[in-house]
Image (cartoon, rainbow, N blue to C red):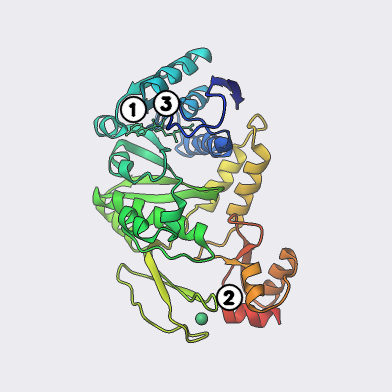
Amino acid sequence: MRIEEGSIEVEVPGEATDGKEGEVFYNPEMELNRDLTVATLRAYREREGDESAAPTTYLDATAASGIRGVRAAADGWTATTCDVDPEAVELAAENFERNGLEGETVHDDANVLMHQERFDVVDVDPFGTPIPFADAAVRSAQGLLCVTATDTAPLCGAHFESGVRKYGAVPRNTEYHAEMGLRVLVSALVRTAAKFDVAARPVFSHVTDHYARTYLDLEQGARAANALLDELGHVDHCQHCLYRDHERGLLADPGEECPHCGHHLQTAGPLWLGDPHDPEFVAAVREQVTDDLGTADRARDLLSTVEEELSAPTHYDQHRLYKRWNESAVGMDDFLATLRDAGHEASGTHYGGTTFKTTADVAEIEAALH
Ligand SMILES: C[S@@+](CC[C@H](N)C(=O)[O-])C[C@H]1O[C@@H](n2cnc3c(N)ncnc32)[C@H](O)[C@@H]1O
Ligand SMILES: [Zn+2]
């Protein structure tokens, strides 16, 4: 089947495929992910400044049909795609050719290629967890590392042991599961980069549908990497009243009682407690969303929500709170205005229409609304 995305046309398998039955993987629902990648690459190239210093090389390490690489090449990047599946490599080569674009198509294990070659931008968009590729990717990427994780159940604590094993962190299954997953993922990537004296700072992240995506700006140097370790820490969560607090530091201080209701607190971590976004960069990405992108409206909406989102962990779900209070929810705009009138900062979040962040704790939220 021939499809168009952005300014290019590629051949992909007919239906959304999982790539596991001899067919090359293609998922039309990832168009938003790919459109945001194109816009992020543009913003990144522009931020890096003049022509001689600007980044030029892009690798999709797990490329399937090569659609990301072809789209990057159409935008002026020197693109490489890599896949272990020979059929995928062949299809990617055809897709570059079909668009009259140059592109290198590598048939290898991504880890082998990434240990051998360096690229300005490395994209890891695999099945499930990106962790098997993380060590090689932070060494291969010289500027920007783009990572997708689709294993949301381990990341958010729904599959606890799997999350602990893969990410070297304790996740907890809370009502802010998407943010929990993102902060576990970024924590693991920051710690992976730190092993190689590389600082990996997230500049844009989002959790959409059933995946988390983060873009990390890489800086070489032990001192820079140390500074990011200071932004790791723990979240203490009360499953009973939804109270939560966070503290920086690699050692947790667990076992306290909830100061709001006295129930036991659960501790998650180490999590990335810093901002998962650089709001200025996110604004620059939004400006790079052009009308030819198929998901332009959705992309702009998501980016402006992310730009406004308060950075501190963790978000609340308005409906969950009202359920605890045995009341029916009020409209989101009124709800946020009430919190702000009471002197608290408050914003919506991209995690869902009923989610919000605020500097108020759970008792202060309750007081403000009653
Ligand atoms: C989710 S698909 C990639 C989707 C693609 N990036 C896109 O935007 O449509 C994952 C791909 O990774 C490939 N893959 C799995 N293990 C790999 C490895 N060790 N090295 C390179 N590619 C691998 C699979 O063959 C599959 O084509
Ligand atoms: Zn409590």
Closer to the chain start, of discs 3 and 1, is 3
The answer for how far apart the CA atoms under marks 3 and 1 are is 12 Å
Closer to the chain start, of discs 2 and 1, is 1
Instruction: Name the spot of residue 33 as percent of width and height, x first.
Output: 54, 39
Give me the disc on residue 22: 3
**Tag 1 secondary structure:** loop
Q: Nearer the viewer, residue 47 or 36?
A: 36
Question: Dot 1: within a 10 Å radius of its alpha carbon, few (fewer than 14), some, or many (20 or more) residues?
Answer: some
Residue position for label 1: 84
Q: For the residues carrying marks 3 and 2, which lies nearer the camera in this image?
A: 3
* Image quadrant where residue 272 sits: bottom left
The answer for how far apart the CA atoms under marks 2 and 1 are is 49 Å
Q: Do the CB atoms of the residues marked 3 and 1 lie less than 8 Å apart?
A: no
Question: Dot 2: within a 10 Å radius of its alpha carbon, few (fewer than 14), some, or many (20 or more) residues?
Answer: some
Say how many tags the image has: 3
Label 1 CB sits under 8 Å from any ligand 1 atom:
yes
Q: Do the CB atoms of the residues marked 3 and 2 lie less than 8 Å apart?
A: no
Residue position for label 2: 360
Q: Nearer the viewer, residue 82 or 349?
A: 82
Look at 50% across and 60% down and name the residue there: 177
Closer to the chain start, of discs 3 and 2, is 3
Does residue 127 appear to the left or right of 251 in the view shown? right
Look at 34% across and 55% down and name the residue there: 167
**Tag 2 secondary structure:** loop
Look at 63% across and 50% down and name the residue there: 304
Q: Amino acid at mark 2?
A: Ala
Say which quadrant the N terminus sits in.
top right
